[in-house]
Image (spheres, rainbow, N blue to C red):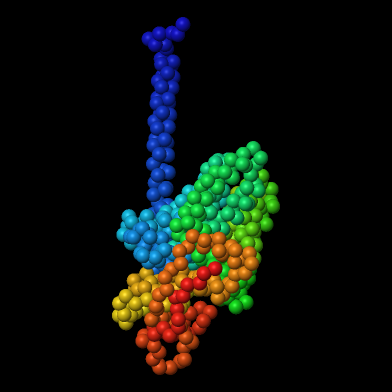
């Protein structure tokens, strides 16, 4: 039987009091720790998204022309419920249906497509960091990989040069797929892979890479069934109601083929000649990729092989298609290099850790933080924290110049007249509100382009027929004006109704001219 408290000696009473005080102190410490933990993570998420919001704001003045094509589609969908460039015509010249839908939702809420693009980009960047954090915890039980890969992606000049397009959304969903693969959430993985395929059609290549690495026990038949069930409805809807199974951009880019001698397979060399520092920074982690061969967790090394297999499959596929070397086409390769290179650096740091923690840090942190230096140099070169040009600038002129052109074009273009646009259409159409026509906005020009340039024969013609099977032939139209461009003659001689001199990468000094259209435009070609 326990002795009564009043029978305890004085030393024993003091010992009991000490134990009771210690127990209460421990409980208080635990409660404080739990309270700090509950506050810590929400606070970190708030700080993360705040940083993503302000950092992405730095690039909103530098949105490229292709972004504004997407924003015109999103605005039209939000305001008129029409999938296309105009409120009364359907078109499908956007690469990412899911991105357009999200931008349209943002436009509906914020009443401004550019602001919607800003908020969506900030959300995607924050989501990328959170997913990387979860991947890092599962692979290494540390945050090193997450920090390194996040910097490698968010400070990558090539990725920043595609801001406003679907690049960040694609990377987020791709990394989400990697996390679900690590977590063995096979049903959700099939759904997420289908969403990747709706984000971009080349997401199907990711499905092939992930499927090859799936373990036998996951139920591959069910996996494929879920994938098809989620993916197919959109493409059937697009085929029947929008008029094409695949986005029209597939045919537009295929018609462009290469930029002279530069195609997708050697386009990085072209960028290195024009933008050496930016291209070097974009490929900074490439030398670290072989480090994945160092000793380390088998699961991490397997994930790295899977990511690199997808990047290689994507590169081979695009090289065989012979598409032009647009920066956003290299997203899968750049993301794969950043992922595998970051993982390789972590393995290097682990390999030298037994020689001292300081050596492990020296092997990791200087390289991991190096992209920040490149971004700092970029801001210094542009002399602004809100620059007008993205790091790898491939458009004809800046957004501000296009805005000024759009305003002056509105003053001289007759009301209600259609204008055949032979130059970049996105920013001009967005800010002018004029009826600008080319293959991105009007399927008459698209089908005419396919017939004249691609010239489908045999299986290609059958493929084209099937793709546009449900497309209703547009009526003929008259286009009395056009926006054309000519080499700058170097004098002040006026050309056309209105002209604007610009210096375009790859074209040099040219003059964009608004003039009477003397060609027979807008005819419909049937297959």
Q: Position of residue 39 (x, y in %)?
A: 39, 41
Residue drawn 63% across the image and 62% down it: 317
Which residue is at a point 59% across and 62% down the rendered structure image? Answer: 463
Residue 476: where, in percent of width, then height? 42, 73
Please name whichever residue, 377 or 402, is drawn nearer the observer in this view of the structure. Answer: 402
| x, y percent for residue 443 | 46, 69
Residue drawn at (39%, 46%), measured in percent from left and top? 43
Res. 217 in view: yes
Lateral position of residue 396 relative to residue 285, left or right: left
In the rendered image, the vertical position of residue 324 relative to residue 471, given as above or below? below
Q: Is residue 285 left or right of residue 495?
A: right
284 vs 439, left or right, is: right
Residue 371 appearing in the image: no
Percent coordinates x, y for residue 490 in the rendering: 46, 92
Camera-side residue: 457 or 419? 457
Say which residue appears at 45% left-offset and 57% top-offset. 241
Q: 467 or 398: nearer the eye? A: 467
Q: Quadrant of residue 290?
A: bottom right
**Residue 408 drawn above or below residue 145:** below
């Amino acid at each position: 039987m326990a002795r009564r408290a009043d029978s305890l000696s004085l030393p024993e009473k003091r010992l009991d009091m000490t134990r009771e005080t210690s127990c209460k102190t421990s409980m208080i410490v635990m409660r404080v720790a739990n309270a700090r933990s509950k506050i810590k993570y929400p606070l970190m998420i708030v700080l993360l998204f705040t940083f993503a919001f302000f950092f992405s704001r730095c690039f909103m003045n530098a949105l490229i022309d292709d972004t504004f094509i997407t924003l015109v589609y999103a605005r039209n969908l939000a305001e008129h419920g029409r999938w296309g460039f105009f409120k009364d015509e359907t078109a499908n010249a956007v690469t990412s249906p899911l991105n357009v839908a999200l931008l349209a939702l943002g436009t509906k809420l914020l009443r401004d497509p550019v602001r919607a693009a800003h908020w969506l980009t900030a959300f995607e960047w924050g989501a990328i960091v959170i997913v990387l954090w979860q991947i890092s915890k599962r692979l290494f039980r540390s945050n090193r990989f997450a920090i390194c890969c996040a910097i490698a992606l968010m400070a990558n000049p090539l990725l920043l040069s595609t801001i406003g397009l679907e690049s960040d959304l694609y990377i987020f969903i791709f990394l989400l797929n990697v996390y679900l693969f690590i977590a063995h959430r096979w049903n959700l993985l099939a759904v997420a892979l289908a969403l990747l395929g709706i984000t971009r059609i080349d997401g199907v290549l990711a499905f092939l890479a992930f499927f090859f690495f799936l373990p036998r026990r996951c139920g591959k038949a069910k996996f494929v069934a879920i994938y098809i069930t989620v993916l197919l409805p959109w493409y059937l809807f697009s085929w029947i109601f929008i008029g094409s199974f695949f986005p029209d951009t597939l045919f537009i880019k295929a018609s462009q083929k290469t930029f002279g001698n530069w195609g997708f397979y050697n386009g990085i060399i072209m960028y290195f000649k024009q933008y050496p520092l930016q291209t070097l920074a974009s490929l900074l982690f490439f030398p670290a990729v072989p480090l994945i061969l160092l000793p380390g967790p088998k699961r991490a090394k397997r994930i790295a092989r899977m990511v690199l297999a997808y990047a290689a499959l994507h590169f081979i596929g695009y090289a065989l298609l012979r598409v032009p070397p647009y920066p956003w086409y290299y997203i899968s390769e750049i993301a794969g290099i950043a992922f595998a290179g970051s993982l390789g650096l972590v393995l290097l740091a682990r390999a030298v850790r037994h020689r001292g923690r300081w050596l492990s840090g020296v092997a990791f942190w200087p390289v991991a933080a190096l992209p920040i230096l490149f971004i700092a140099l970029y801001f210094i070169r542009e002399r602004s924290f809100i620059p007008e040009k993205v790091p790898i600038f491939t458009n004809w002129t800046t957004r501000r110049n296009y805005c000024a052109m759009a305003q002056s074009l509105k003053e001289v273009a007759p009301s209600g007249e259609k204008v055949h646009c032979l130059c970049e259409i996105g920013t001009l159409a967005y800010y002018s509100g004029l009826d600008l026509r080319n293959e991105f906005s009007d399927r008459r020009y698209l089908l005419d382009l396919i017939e004249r340039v691609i010239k489908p024969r045999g299986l290609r013609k059958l493929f084209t027929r099937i793709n546009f099977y449900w497309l209703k032939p547009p009526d003929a139209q008259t286009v009395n004006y056009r926006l054309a461009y000519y080499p700058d003659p170097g004098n002040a001689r006026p050309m056309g109704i209105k002209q604007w001199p610009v210096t375009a990468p790859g074209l040099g000094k040219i003059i964009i001219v608004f003039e009477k259209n003397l060609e027979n435009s807008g005819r419909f070609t049937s297959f």
